[in-house]
Image: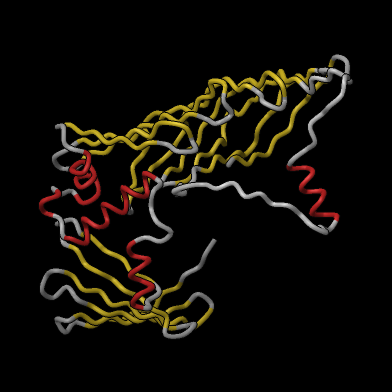
Amino acid sequence: MVTANLGGDLTIKGPLARAPVISGTINLAKTVITVPEKLPGSLAALNVRHKNAPAAVRAQDKALRPATASGGSGGGGLNLDVTVNAPSQIFIQGRGVDAELGGSLRLTGPASSPQAVGTFDLQRGRLSILAKRLTFTEGTVGFSGSLVPYLNLTATSTTSTTTVTIVVSGEATNPKFNFSSVPALPEDEVLAQLIFGRSMSNLSPLQIAQLAEAAAQLAGIGGSTSLLQNLRSAIGVDDLDVITDEEGGTAVSAGKYLNDRTYVTIQKGDKPGSGKAAIDLDVGRGVKLRGEATDAGEAKGGVFYEREY
């Protein structure tokens, strides 16, 4: 889906009753290209017929499905010859991608099925996978006739033993994520090294499940809820997360609101003495009281001030 703010100067030339040409320049301001987070397994066409529909519904139906012109007028509709300029603020968002591009394209042909040709170049961008953030180093969004843009974005990250390259390519409706590394590794090993800095053989079962969920998210074939969301709903907590430290140790953290002002967090890791519990009490006006205790008998407390801008 694409949303845009735009302005420009256009002219209409030619016989209005037949095939006038709209030409000129359109300048795009903020434009957002949204990549779908998930793709449905199948689609079915529904034959919807409105009976006794109110005027607003009939007007919308007519706008969505305009009547086909008939008769001998020979009208060919509107033709386009428009240049679209967008030096910046072309945003691509979804499936972990957040990038900004700039460039231009040209729209030609009939307004009912215009042809788009042009390229937008990367200005900045990042890719987030399971809280791991990578920066795009190069990329383009191209139009070669279709109104659906073609993505080609590259991100690189270096771990202690591996240099990982991720390429996001394909149509924006369903981009593909390809992983490669130096030295060369299988894609599942590349993902494990990228996110956890460890080999697949050294991951815990929960970490392997997280990798599978991340792969499904990138492929756009994930279910309606994630693994952690399903667990969160099953045990009745407000937050559930898996934390990995720099040494590869893992811990599970669960949080729940006892009431509107009191929030409790319990965390347990795979190492002795890694368990702890914390309670936050919101006293108002951005001030919070926090107390924390570990299973080793240590305790601490503090006063925090938070404000959103």
Left or right: where 60 falls relative to 170: right
Tally of marks: 0
Left or right: where 144 falls relative to 210: right
Q: Is 289 or 184 nearer to us in this picture? A: 184
Q: Is 101 or 145 nearer to us in this picture? A: 145
Looking at the image, which residue is at 25% across and 74% down? 267
Looking at the image, which residue is at 49% across and 38% down? 173
Rendered-image quadrant of the C terminus: bottom right
Left or right: where 242 falls relative to 230: left
Q: Position of residue 229 (x, y in %)?
A: 37, 66
In the image, is residue 77 above or below residue 296?
above
Looking at the image, which residue is at 21% across and 58% down? 207
Q: Is 57 or 118 nearer to us in this picture? A: 57
Q: Position of residue 261 (x, y in %)?
A: 47, 83
Q: Position of residue 57 (x, y in %)?
A: 79, 54
Rendered-image quadrant of the N terminus: top right
Q: State the image quarter where residue 66 is shown.
A: top right
Q: Position of residue 274 (x, y in %)?
A: 17, 73
Left or right: where 174 falls relative to 19: left
Looking at the image, which residue is at 72% across and 25% down? 111
Q: Residue furthest top?
A: 14
